[in-house]
Image (cartoon, rainbow, N blue to C red):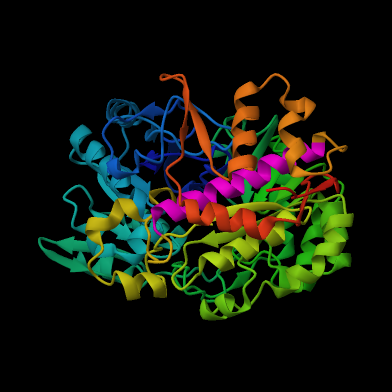
Amino acid sequence: MKVLLVQPPIEDFYDTSIRTYPLALLYLGAQIKDICEVTVLDLRTGRKPRRLDEHPFPDLNIFYKEHIRTPFSFFSAYYRFGADEGEIKREIEKEKPDVVCISSLFTTYSLEALDVARSAKETNKEIITVVGGIHPTLFPRHVLASPWVDYVIRGEGETPLFQMVSALITGGIDKAKAASIDGLCSKEGDKFIISEAHVEKHIDIIPERRLVDPEAYRIGKRNYSFFLTSRGCPFHCTFCGRPAVPYRRRGLESIEKEIGDCLDLNIKAIDFEDDMLNLNARLFKETMKLFEGKDLTLSAMNGIYSETLDAHTLETMYSAGFRRLNFSLVDISKPLIQRQERLFSRNFLTLIPYLEDSPYLVEAHFIIGLPGQKPEEIIDTLLFLMGKRILPGPSLFYLAPNSPIFNEVVGDDWEGAIKSMRSSAMVPVNPLLPRETLFTFMKLVRFINYVKQIIDREPGLKTLCEVPMAPALENRPIDREILSALISERRFKYYDVKEKRFLKEPLDEGLERLFFRKAEGMTIRGFKTMNSLKVHGL
């Protein structure tokens, strides 16, 4: 029997090429490789994006434009990242699988996953199609309602898939057998048989990374891989829609063996995908010790839990290979944090003096657009991060399925909004933050980060008014003009390449003025250096 594990393409205004490693499929492959032939088909990575003229967000065309020049660029066009229908069918035909298992992690991309199931059935109607991931875990009926889907696996899929494939090999799956497999959902005509989500009892499984080409996944010049040392999260923030699974940590012995596997494959960079990587401070430090001396670059793009960190732990992390830290700040407003039932982020503020003096590069992620969030609170967060040796990392709020906020705002009537459950849709859930305001905040963050970049390169700058004349902009007249206009007029413009003229950005002008008024007299500090300048004369 042959099983094909598939990562589908996605369609969006952007994709992050260093975030496509199909780790979940490699866990599944490790569990079934001894009982069947298994192949991973990554239909997303390593293909040139294809621009889509027709897309679900024509009302965003006013904000996302092509053929423009600005140092504060944002999204431009809508793309398909990955294989088209023709390639999908050719790949499936070439592999001739008996079972096609499709990863469907996010609701907003679930239709692309269902298209893969359709392509499989149209290639060979005898293929058994299975869909797993966060979306089918949350909405199994939505997935099973597709005529192209035979089964859904809810929850963690290693054991359910193993049991399912074993049953197929030994004679098939009848109604009783399907019901006996924890996490496996099926259908009989219009009737859906829904199982509870499966939770793995033993998580010391080591993913089978040999199922993919390690050279296909790179950060810079280094092969990279995702890595898990734990599963689950004990917290329940109101904006998070992760399925509720218990927090569990892996054993150190299996982690050490997996490190060896990565080194054998010439993997040189590791990104930890744990929801709570360092929740247990003692075990985290022991884990970091396993990475020392391995010449691995470590990162945690999901974010570091700040409450268990101290100087000694941060020194241990540096010795292990961390050079850049991503923190999940959300906002610096204490009342807002409490409203979101978020139980952490305050310790991050006490760590800042140490971090600024350390060799680390630090990025702080915060959310723009939360229900109840006030524009003034976001400005305060921006101004705070602006004055620190920290890179502000904005995340536009979106309604994450299964989150308390999602359930309150959307409820069961969500299927028509599938494509809007993404940050790039700029859905204005908060009436105080319409699209123009959200877009303005993103431009302001890009402005701050651009100035930080210039400051790092030009240590002699004393005030913001000097930035447009910095030597770094000597051969960039358009950038210089846009910066000069922004500083003097407090208004963003862009250069239209086709019309060959400068035009105003469609922004919230009142917010622009408020930000620059509140920024007057404050400091902007670099990201890589402690170089700084003052905001004067606006």
Q: Residue furthest left?
A: 189
Question: Is 96 a magenta residue?
Answer: no
Q: Which residue shows up at 79% across the image and 72% down it?
A: 282
The residue lying toward the viewer, choosing from 220 and 526, is: 526
Is residue 263 something that shows in the picture?
no
Quarter of the figure with residue 384: bottom right
Q: Relative to 483, is 102 above or below?
A: below
Q: Which residue shows up at 46% across the image and 58% down it?
A: 158
The residue lying toward the viewer, choosing from 497 and 222, is: 497
Q: Which residue shows up at 66% across the image and 47% down it?
A: 448
Residues in magenta, as a range: 434-456
Q: Relative to 488, is 409 above or below?
A: below
Q: Which residue shows up at 60% across the image and 24% down it?
A: 478
Residue 22 x/y as whole percent: 51, 45
Q: Relative to 341, is 132 above or below?
A: above
Left or right of 487: which side holds 456?
Answer: right
Left or right of 354: which side holds 472?
Answer: left
Is residue 129 something that shows in the picture?
yes
Most common SS among magenta residues: helix
Tell how many labels.
0
Residue 398 x/y as whole percent: 42, 59
Left or right of 417: which side holds 203?
Answer: right
